[in-house]
């Protein structure tokens, strides 16, 4: 069940990230940091999808761990965009809240899967 939740939430988050990237590129003319955000923010869901087709439990854990790292990197880029005034605090808080929720879910799945090994 948690795997379906993380799949849905990571996909929704990726859609939000793509839309933020489009805004930053078109309205703010910011391309460097926003591209990094686009890469890491969409990679979370891609790695969650890969994990669903893992060859083994250790492979599953490994793929989710990559998603977890990408999620944490996304939080870094969001902080940087906020501190450089490309996004406002409200936008930052909304995206950070979603990313932190994903991070908690991923950690929970990883820990429970490790216990089952």
Image: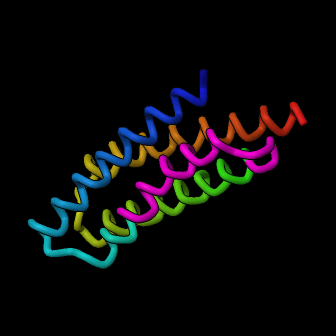
Which residue in the rendered view is the most extreme toward the right? 117
**Does 26 sit above or below residue 103?**
below
Q: Nearer the viewer, residue 71 or 62?
A: 62
80 displayed left or right of 63:
left
**Residue 98: image x %, image y %?**
42, 40
Q: Quadrant of residue 94?
A: top left
Residue lying at 59% horizontally and 48% vertically, measured from the top left = 50
Q: Is residue 81 magenta?
A: no
| Residue at 62 percent of width and 39 percent of height | 52
Which part of the image, by quadrant, shows the C terminus? top right
Span shown in magenta:
38-59
Q: Residue furthest bottom?
A: 32
Residue 57 is covered by the magenta coloring: yes
Answer left or right for 96 relative to 89: right
Residue 93 appears at what percent x and percent y? Answer: 35, 46
Q: Tell me the quarter of the image containing the N terminus.
A: top right
Q: Quadrant of residue 115?
A: top right
Colour scheme shown: rainbow
Residue 114 x %, y %: 84, 39
Instruction: Give above or below for 38 relative to 45.
Output: below
Image coords of residue 35 (percent x, y):
33, 71
Residue drawn at x 46%, y 46% is 99
């Amino acid at each position: 069940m948690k795997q379906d939740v993380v799949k849905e939430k990571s996909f929704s988050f990726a859609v939000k990230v793509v839309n933020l990237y489009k805004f930053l590129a078109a309205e703010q003319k910011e391309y460097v940091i926003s591209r990094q955000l686009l890469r890491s923010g969409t990679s979370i869901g891609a790695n969650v999808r890969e994990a669903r087709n893992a060859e083994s439990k250790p492979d599953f854990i490994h793929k989710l761990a990559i998603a977890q790292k990408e999620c944490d990197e996304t939080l870094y880029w969001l902080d940087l965009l906020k501190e450089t005034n490309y996004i406002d605090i409200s936008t930052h808080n909304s995206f950070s809240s979603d990313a932190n929720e994903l991070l908690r879910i991923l950690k929970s799945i990883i820990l429970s899967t490790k216990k089952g090994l």
